[in-house]
Image (cartoon, helix red, strand yellow):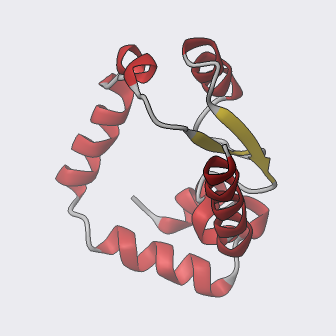
Amino acid sequence: MPTRWLSPLLLGRFATTPLRAALSRAISQVSPSVMRARLRSVLNVDRSAQLPRIEVPTVYLRATEDRVVPKAASLRIAELKPQVQVIDVAAVHCLLQVAPVEAAHLVLGFLGAQQVR
């Protein structure tokens, strides 16, 4: 699958030359048959029934510009497990790649808040 098609979807306005190159390298390491199998899995796997069984504090970093995971998915997560802390991050689907420092600060802040409880 050509990177020029995936870059707008996965990186959006945050795409930089280094991020596009990293995406291209990552995609080139996956055979087309494996990529197809992964995409089918994403479309067919639903683990929402297991979500309420998670017994540890949980945070969901929601990319506000995600073009892959619909906003309805995060609403469903909050419905299934109201204790999940949803934190919006101005990012796209590849949130950890386009906003690594912010994501790390948010996760560390979440963990620190859990220690206080």
Q: In the rendered view, would you say 104 is above or below 8?
A: below
Q: Nearer the viewer, residue 13 or 85?
A: 85
Residue 38: % across, % down: 28, 44
Q: Nearer the viewer, residue 28 or 88?
A: 88
Residue located 55% across and 38% down the image? 58
Residue located 58% across and 77% down the image? 20
Where is residue 27, by image quadrant? bottom left
Q: In the rendered view, would you say 90 is above or below 84?
A: below
Residue 84: % across, % down: 62, 30
Residue 57: % across, % down: 54, 38
Residue lying farthest front? 117
Residue 75 left/right relative to 22: right
Residue 26: % across, % down: 37, 73
Counting every numbered tag in the picture gives 0
Q: In the rendered view, would you say 4 is above or below 45?
A: below
Q: In the rendered view, would you say 87 is above or below 30?
A: above
Where is residue 39, by image quadrant? top left
Residue located 61% across and 55% down the image? 111
- Tell me the quadrant of the picture where the N terminus can be found: bottom left
- Tell me the quadrant of the picture where the C terminus can be found: top right
Residue 56 left/right relative to 41: right
